[in-house]
Image (cartoon, rainbow, N blue to C red):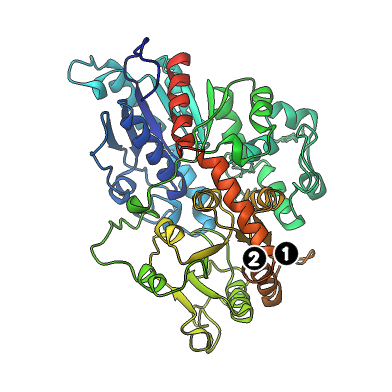
Amino acid sequence: MAGDEQQQQAPLHVVVFPWLAFGHLIPFLELSKRLAARGHAVTFVSTPRNVARLPPVPAAGLSGQVRMVALPLPAVDGLPEGAESTADLPPEKVELLKAAFDGLAAPFADFLAAACSADGRSGELERRPDWVVLDFAHHWLCPIADQHQVPCAMFLIVTGTMLAYNGSRRENASHPRVTVDDFMPMPRWFPSPPSLAFRRQEAAWMAAAFRPNASGVSDIERTWRTEERCRLLVFRSCPEAEPRTVFPLLAELFGKPAVPAGLLLPEPEEDARDGGGHSNAVARPGALQWLDGQPPRSVLYVALGSEAPVTAASVHELALGLELSGVRFLWALRPPSGGGGTGTGEQPLLPEGFEERTRGRGAACMGWVPQVRVLAHAAVGAFLTHCGWGSVAESLRFGHPLVMLPFVVDQGLIARMMSERGVGVEVARRDDDGGFSRDDVAAAVTRVMVEEEGKELALNAKRLRELVVGDDGGRQERYVDELVECLQRHS
Ligand SMILES: *[C@@H]1O[C@H](CO)[C@@H](O)[C@H](O)[C@H]1NC(C)=O
Ligand SMILES: *[C@@H]1O[C@H](CO)[C@@H](O)[C@H](O)[C@H]1NC(C)=O
Ligand SMILES: *[C@@H]1O[C@H](CO)[C@@H](O)[C@H](O)[C@H]1NC(C)=O
């Protein structure tokens, strides 16, 4: 599959080790499956409960192998027993998970030492690893890999634009950003359209995240320490989906190859995400059954991801906005994460009478919703999203126009990137507190779903889809081929 028949390279053995969040575990698993499909051996390292909750790797079509290694997560004061991923914790306890995660350094060192002393006589997986592919949080890992002369590649599940915005330690030293205003525009090393910027609320989040954190090692410090010792930077992205200049700029900023791995999209029939351990049940999920009864391209699919900080008040405004807009919708609804909500759990999740008033044209699903299968459904015409990169990437493949409601991290930047491409409209937010009202929601939904403008957005979304997928549908897979060649060349 990797092209070069003349120069058949030996299969690689790659150790992959994602951060303990399903938004990371799943793309690392998608990468693993694609490496195994090309004949390579992958050792996937995580913790016991995460390994147990991952969707099974289908053996069919894999000429290589994926082996799971579960390192027990050390106990840390205050971290609930059994909490092994961010999905098991409220946001304020994630730092404790990082502390526990740092305790995996010694078990990982033992694992790698054993893996490197294996003789390879009983199969590829028993061969010494050629690479460790790691995430942003593993600031302690590269020194361990160095001891065994195993090179490291950092796999970022985010856009290249986000890492370019963060810059390297050297950019931080030469052009430090201090105030919230400093964090709003793209930095001076990034030649961008002015529309690409963070809003005040989003920039405040970034500014806080850049401050050294006394409780341990900040995310940016983890990222820099890891990046500095990696030979390659690999992104779950592709140049077609980002501003033109990003990949060359990254190579220059970080002084090493910046390689797109493609969007690594799961196949609709293999859609089993979020760590619920859901297999594709025999019964057709309710959300899909409901869609079956709707006219083509008529439904707005609404999902704000599993970990966006959505308050109870936001859920209400969103509901009332959907009601006002009059459009058909399917809402993958999650309980709010608190902050600004009542926090008592006594207030009903949805406004009084909402379900009765929208019955027939709207459905709110509390359980697990197979997002990729929903996006693939002919009845879906647009996607209201929090603009997590995984969701936007999944949507790009089906060419849906977007209604965008970003919250934190890189979501605002992704929303601006997609506005710039003319494939979506953002829900307006207030300048002071970043809040939004039902009218703001209804206005954005109507622009995308009802007004003439929506046709243009849908056309642009379709064009972007063709650009990303490629004429023969194979562009994304070619990025994986190129990544493999790059791993072989640099190992
Ligand atoms: C960029 O920096 C923010 C703030 O420290 C951090 O949360 C995020 O993970 C970083 N992203 C990348 C790609 O480095
Ligand atoms: C970034 O640079 C500023 C100014 O030199 C410094 O105070 C800050 O600690 C640096 N940030 C990090 C995360 O190292
Ligand atoms: C460090 O970060 C944690 C979680 O983000 C936060 O709760 C804590 O207050 C921060 N500590 C400092 C000193 O900023």
Q: Residue at point 72% right, 49% down? A: 420
Q: Position of residue 466 (x, y in %)?
A: 55, 44
Q: For this view, does 153 lie left or right of residue 327?
A: left
Residue 76 visible at all: yes
Q: Which mark, by number, is residue 125?
A: none
Which residue, given by chain and number where applicable, does mark 1 sit on?
Answer: 434
Q: Residues within 10 Å of mark 1 (few under 14, many from 20)?
A: few
Which quadrant of the rendered structure holds the C terminus?
Answer: top left
Check the image and report above or below for 232 versus 268: above
**Apparent side of residue 228 relative to residue 346 in the rendered image (left or right):** right
Is 438 left or right of 489, judged from the image as shown? right
* 221 over 100 or under it: above or below: above
Residue 129 vs 404, above or below: the answer is above
In front: 113, or 413?
Answer: 413
Residue 428, image x, y percentages: 73, 65
Whether residue 491 can be seen here: no
